[in-house]
């Protein structure tokens, strides 16, 4: 589990840099300021949650794999795809209905962070 999520976290972090650079250099003059702001929000959340996948991999290495950690990683990955992905497509295409699925990715982020917190907290209680 540790290697898989650290590798995926590294790839997703690399993609967030590439997608951010694409937006800054290729889209800046093509789409308006509001769309660029939406795109940048997607990049920020993408990067933060890609780093979180690395943290989950490190946590699994320190504490061992668990069902909660696996689901936390899955939910954060789904959140990147749905939340950030919908913002990328929305900002480039202007298809407003995509904004309706963005909160689904946000809920996945929240659930992933909650599972990570619960896993670490419960393991800490077991050691005391």
Image (cartoon, rainbow, N blue to C red):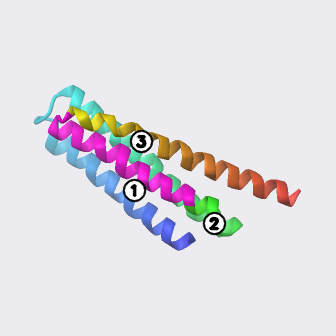
Magenta highlight: main SS: helix
Residue 125: x percent and y percent?
83, 54
Q: Provide the secondary structure element on which disc 3 rests.
A: helix
Viewer-closest of 112 and 18:
112
- The span picked out in magenta is 71-95
Q: How many neighbours does mark 2 have within 10 angstroms: few (below 14), some (14-19), or many (20 or more)?
A: some
Is residue 14 a member of the stretch shown in magenta? Answer: no
Q: Provide the secondary structure element on which disc 2 rests.
A: helix
Viewer-closest of 34 and 17:
34
Residue 40: x percent and y percent?
31, 37
Q: How many neighbours does mark 1 have within 10 angstroms: few (below 14), some (14-19), or many (20 or more)?
A: many
Closer to the chain start, of discs 3 and 1, is 1
Disc 3 to disc 1, C-alpha distance: 21 Å
Q: Provide the secondary structure element on which disc 1 rests.
A: helix
Closer to the chain start, of discs 2 and 3, is 2
Q: Is residue 119 left or right of residue 6?
A: right
Q: Residue at x 62, y 52 (%)?
A: 116
Residue 23: x percent and y percent?
22, 43
Quickly name the residue at label 3: 104
Q: Residue at x 32, y 57 (%)?
A: 15
Would you say the residues marked 1 and 2 are in contact, meaning their CB atoms lie under 8 Å apart?
no
How many numbered marks appear?
Answer: 3
Q: Is residue 95 above or below residue 33?
A: below
**Image depth: mark 2 or mark 3 in front:** 3
Quickly name the residue at label 2: 60
Residue 13 is labelled as 1
Q: Residue at x 22, y 37 (%)?
A: 91
The picture quadrant where one finds residue 50 is bottom left
Would you say the residues marked 2 and 3 are in contact, meaning their CB atoms lie under 8 Å apart?
no
**Image depth: mark 1 or mark 2 in front:** 2
Q: How many neighbours does mark 3 have within 10 angstroms: few (below 14), some (14-19), or many (20 or more)?
A: some
Is residue 87 a member of the stretch shown in magenta? Answer: yes
């Amino acid at each position: 589990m540790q290697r898989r999520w650290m590798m995926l976290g590294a790839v997703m972090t690399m993609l967030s840099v590439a997608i951010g650079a694409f937006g800054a250099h290729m889209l800046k003059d093509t789409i308006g300021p509001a769309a660029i702001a939406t795109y940048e929000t997607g990049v920020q959340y993408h990067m933060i949650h890609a780093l979180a996948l690395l943290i989950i991999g490190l946590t699994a290495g320190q504490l061992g794999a668990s069902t909660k950690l696996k689901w936390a990683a899955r939910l954060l990955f789904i959140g990147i795809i749905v939340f950030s992905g919908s913002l990328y497509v929305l900002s480039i295409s202007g298809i407003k209905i995509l904004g309706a699925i963005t909160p689904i990715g946000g809920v996945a982020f929240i659930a992933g962070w909650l599972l990570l917190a619960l896993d670490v907290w419960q393991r800490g209680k077991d050691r005391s």
